[in-house]
Amino acid sequence: MMKIAILTVCLLAAGLQQVQAEPNESAKFLIHDAVSLMDFGIYKLENDIKGLRDDLTIRFQPPHSSFVEYDWDANKIVIVLSYGDPGNPPIKELKTEIRSVVATLKKNFGIAPTGEPFQAGGFSSVGDYFSHRGYTKKNTPPNLRREIDHLVEIKIIFYVQNYSRYFECRNRLVGSSIEETRCTDYLP
């Protein structure tokens, strides 16, 4: 009986040691690193874009993926949508439909197809994703919302020919019309 009690105590002690393990260096880094307004704004904007997928479909296939990222080198917040078609649809038709997707995105954020904001203040709703709720800090730059608008770029990647080739189209959220959407030729 004494042997069973000693064995039980040893097993419990071994189990407690496993429960009391500490985070490794990577986990400690993540625990102690703060989330910025940029991080949280990108997260909120990305969730909203994913919610818009049904409104952004084109005739071929819905977006395979959608995400938002900050391009540090270009200083841009990039909204990325990717579509695809296993065949070889006419690129002219695709580009027309992609311009329609760009127009829908712009409209959703309060921007006309011409690239101008609808609101009297002269900015889109994108700045709402990158702000505090219910208050504004005293050190907030006065033109923050306009400046955020100028950081945002829409990028659409369309895959064709069994997804072996693709092309990209880009348009700035403000300051460029949907007709100014720049598209590459087929890559690679």
Image: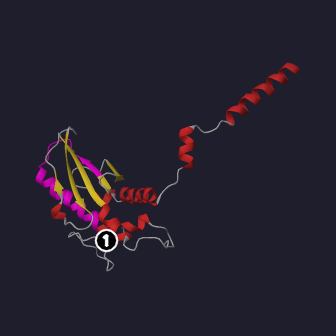
In the displayed image of the protein, which residue is found farthest to the front? Answer: 139
Q: Percent x, y for residue 49?
A: 36, 58
| Residue 118 in view in this figure | yes
Q: In the image, is residue 20 above or below residue 124?
A: above
In this rendering, is residue 88 above or below 77?
Answer: above
Q: Is residue 182 magenta?
A: no
Taking depth in this image into account, of 38 and 108 the one nearest to the observer is 38
Left/right placement of residue 31 relative to residue 88 reads: right
Q: Position of residue 159 (x, y in %)?
A: 22, 44
Q: How many labels does the image show?
A: 1
Q: Give the range drawn in magenta.
A: 81-106
Residue 94 point in image, percent of width and height: 16, 53
Q: Name the residue under label 1.
A: 110
Amino acid on which disc 1 is placed = Gly
- Residue drawn at 29 percent across, 63 percent down: 105
Count neighbours of disc 1 (C-alpha within 10 A) and say few if under 14, some if 14 to 19, many if 20 or more: many
